[in-house]
Amino acid sequence: ERDATTRAVSAMTNAVYRLCEFRVQVVRESGSLGDDALCSPTDVAAWINAAGMLPDDGVEHFAMVALDSQNHPIGWFPTSTGTVSASLVDPKVIFRNALLAPGCASIILVHNHPSGEPAPSREDIRLTQQLVEAGKLLELRIHDHIIVGSGSGRWVSLAERGLVSKVHAFERQFAGTGASAGGARGDGRDRKG
């Protein structure tokens, strides 16, 4: 019996695995996402609205903003387009984009609610917490998840509501550095952009 076990282990040790090779090439597109650092949820909401990043077409759109180490936006990655009440988000796509963005130090999650009501759903909260936990494994910080109410000018920061668990909110990260917190109150009330 021992001899049979030894042969089985030896056969498994000598097994050959075929791996497919592939190459990824990152190409920087022309155009600028702006020179200003996104230092607060207010900054992020204003940047999204000013640039018209989220279409107001009656369906949910989910995207990710890649930031450099100084919180300058270095990439805008539309991740998912859904229905009037939901958007299917694949964590692998979010983190693949973040890991391939040259110089990405952290990310911000963004999506809209076509109803105009930016209050987070249970699914929004669950997804955010799932992504925060995955980000920890990759040592990639998720600063916030901003939900924009389409057409209402209102938005909600899940970090300000304490729903981005164990991740420093913008105000804590920039405390004592002289950077502005952009007037974020942290009181969890919906904001006008």
Image (tube, helix red, strand yellow):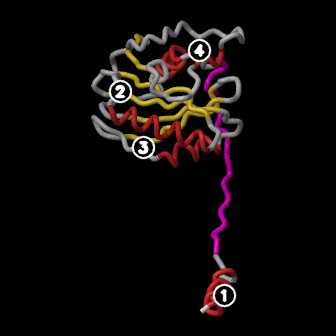
Q: In this view, does 177 lie to the left or right of 144?
A: right
Mark 4: few, some, or many residues within 10 Å (few <14, many ≥20)?
A: many
Please name the residue shown 58% across and 43% down the image.
97
Q: Which of these two is toward me, 28 or 121?
A: 121
How far separated are the C-alphas under marks 4 and 1? 60 Å
**Residue type beneath disc 4:** Glu
Q: Where is residue 161 in the image (x, y as percent from the top left)?
A: 44, 19
Question: Which one is earlier in the sequence, the residue at label 4 or at label 2?
Answer: 2
Given contact means CB atoms under 8 Å apart, are the residues at marks 4 and 3 in contact? no
Q: Name the residue under label 3.
A: 89
Query: On the rendered image, what quadrant is the C terminus found in?
Result: top left
Looking at marks 4 and 3 on the same chain, the residue that comes earlier in the sequence is marked by: 3
Q: What stretch is highlighted in magenta?
A: 18-36
Q: Position of 175 compared to 111: left or right? A: right
Give me the C-alpha separation between circle 2 and circle 3: 15 Å
Q: 63 or 164: which is nearer to us?
A: 164
Please tell me whether residue 144 is drawn above or below residue 16 in the rendered image: above
Q: What element carries label 1?
A: helix
Sequence-wise first label, 2 or 3? 3
Pointer 3 local density, CA inside 10 Å: few below 14, some 14–19, many at least 20: some
Q: Looking at the image, tell me whether mark 4 or mark 1 is earlier in sequence order.
A: 1
| Residue at the spot of label 4 | 171
State how many labels appear: 4
Alpha carbon of mark 3 to alpha carbon of mark 1: how far?
46 Å
Q: What residue type is labelled 2?
A: Pro
* Disc nearest the viewer among 3 and 1: 1
Per the image, the residue denoted by label 2 is 120
Amino acid type for the residue under numbered disc 3: Val
Tell which tag, 4 or 1, sits nearer the viewer.
1
Distance in Å between CA atoms under marks 4 and 3: 28 Å
